[in-house]
C-alpha cells in the first residue's frame, strides 16, 4: 500500500478507528516514512488541543445552586399543605439523582480523558522520528537516565528468556505531571509503559484492571505509590504478560 493510501487512513488512525491489523501496518509504515509520521503527529496534536479546549468550561458550584433553587420554586397556594409534604421528598430524590448522575458522569469523563490522552501519547511516540530520548535495551542504562528528570524511581524487569525487548524511554506528562514513558517491543509491535506518581486527581480515582480504548488494549495498577499503564495494539495476553513482569520487577 502506497503513501497516498495510508494518508487517507491517518484520521482513522488518530481516532482509533482502524482495525488492530491495519493500525499495526500503518505503524510499521510510519517508521520508514517521515512524511506520514509527521502527518499523523499533526493529527494527534490537533486532537489533543481540541480535547483540552472542550474541558476548559466546567459548571461552577454557583450555577448548580442557581439551578437547584430554580427547581425548588415555591408551589402554588391552591395545592395546600398535602402537596408540600409530597413535593419535598420528591424534590430531594430529584436533587440526589441529579447529583449522583453528575458525579458519575464527571468521573467517567475523567477516566476516558486519561485513557484517551495516554493513547494519544502512545500514537505520538510511534509517529515521531525519535520515539525515545534514551535508546537502550539495557534496563541498567534506562533506569538511571531518569534520575533527576522525574520525582520518583522505579524498577524495570529482566527480560531475558521472554519475547519482550526494551527499546528505551523518555520523560512524558499527564495533566502536567511528569512521568516515565518506556517503549517495549514484542514481535514487531510496540507497547508503551507509562509510570506516574499516584497522587494527582487524574489517576488517584482510577480503578485498576484491564480496559480497551480506541484501537488499544490497556492495563493499569498501583504499586508502591506509583500508577502503571501498559498500552498497545497487541493482545490482552501480551499486555498482561508485560504487566506481570513489571509488577514482579526488583
Image (cartoon, rainbow, N blue to C red):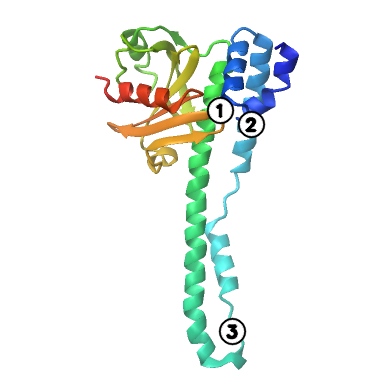
C-alpha span from label 2 to label 3: 48 Å
C-alpha span from label 2 to label 1: 8 Å
Q: Give coordinates of residue 59: x percent, y percent.
A: 57, 54
Q: Circle 2: is it few (<14), some (14-19), or many (20+) Cα within 10 Å?
A: some
Q: Under tag 2, what secondary structure? A: helix
Q: Give coordinates of residue 108: x percent, y percent.
A: 50, 47
Q: Give coordinates of residue 217: x percent, y percent.
A: 48, 29
Mark with earlier residue (2, 3): 2
Q: Under tag 3, what secondary structure? A: loop
Residue 34 is left or right of residue 232, and the answer is right
C-alpha span from label 3 to label 1: 51 Å
State the residue at coordinates (53%, 25%): 121
State the residue at coordinates (65%, 20%): 40
Q: Give coordinates of residue 238: x percent, y percent.
A: 41, 22
The foreground one among 157 and 47 is 157
Q: Is residue 55 above or below residue 174?
A: below
Residue occupied by mark 3:
75
Mark with earlier residue (3, 1): 3
Residue 124 is left or right of residue 144, and the answer is right
State the residue at coordinates (60%, 48%): 57
Residue occupied by mark 1:
120
Q: Quadrant of the N terminus?
A: top right
The foreground one among 245 and 20 is 20
Residue occupied by mark 2:
47
Q: Are marks 3 and 1 in contact (CB under 8 Å)?
A: no
Q: Circle 3: is it few (<14), some (14-19), or many (20+) Cα within 10 Å?
A: few
Amino acid at each position: 500500500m502506497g503513501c497516498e493510501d495510508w494518508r487517507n487512513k491517518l484520521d482513522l488512525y488518530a481516532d482509533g478507528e482502524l482495525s488492530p491489523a491495519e493500525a499495526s501496518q500503518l505503524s510499521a509504515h510510519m517508521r520508514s516514512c517521515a512524511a506520514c509520521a509527521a502527518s499523523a503527529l499533526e493529527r494527534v496534536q490537533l486532537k489533543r488541543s481540541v480535547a483540552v479546549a472542550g474541558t476548559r468550561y466546567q459548571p461552577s458550584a454557583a450555577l448548580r445552586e442557581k439551578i437547584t433553587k430554580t427547581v425548588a420554586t415555591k408551589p402554588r397556594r391552591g395545592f395546600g399543605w398535602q402537596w408540600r409534604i409530597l413535593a419535598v421528598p420528591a424534590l430531594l430524590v430529584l436533587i440526589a439523582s441529579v447529583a449522583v448522575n453528575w458525579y458519575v458522569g464527571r468521573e467517567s469523563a475523567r477516566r476516558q480523558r486519561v485513557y484517551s490522552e495516554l493513547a494519544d501519547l502512545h500514537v505520538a511516540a510511534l509517529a515521531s522520528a525519535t520515539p525515545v530520548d534514551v535508546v537502550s535495551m539495557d534496563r541498567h542504562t534506562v533506569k538511571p537516565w531518569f534520575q533527576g528528570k522525574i520525582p520518583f524511581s522505579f524498577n524495570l524487569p529482566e527480560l531475558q528468556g521472554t519475547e519482550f525487548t526494551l527499546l528505551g524511554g523518555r520523560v512524558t506528562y499527564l495533566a502536567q505531571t511528569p512521568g516515565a514513558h518506556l517503549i517495549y517491543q514484542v514481535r514487531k509491535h510496540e507497547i508503551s509503559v507509562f509510570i506516574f506518581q499516584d497522587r494527582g486527581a487524574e489517576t488517584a480515582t482510577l480503578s485498576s484492571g484491564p480496559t480497551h480504548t480506541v484501537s488499544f488494549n490497556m492495563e493499569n495498577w498501583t504499586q508502591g505509590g506509583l500508577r502503571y499503564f501498559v498500552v498497545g495494539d497487541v493482545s490482552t495476553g501480551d499486555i498482561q504478560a508485560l504487566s506481570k513482569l513489571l509488577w514482579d520487577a526488583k
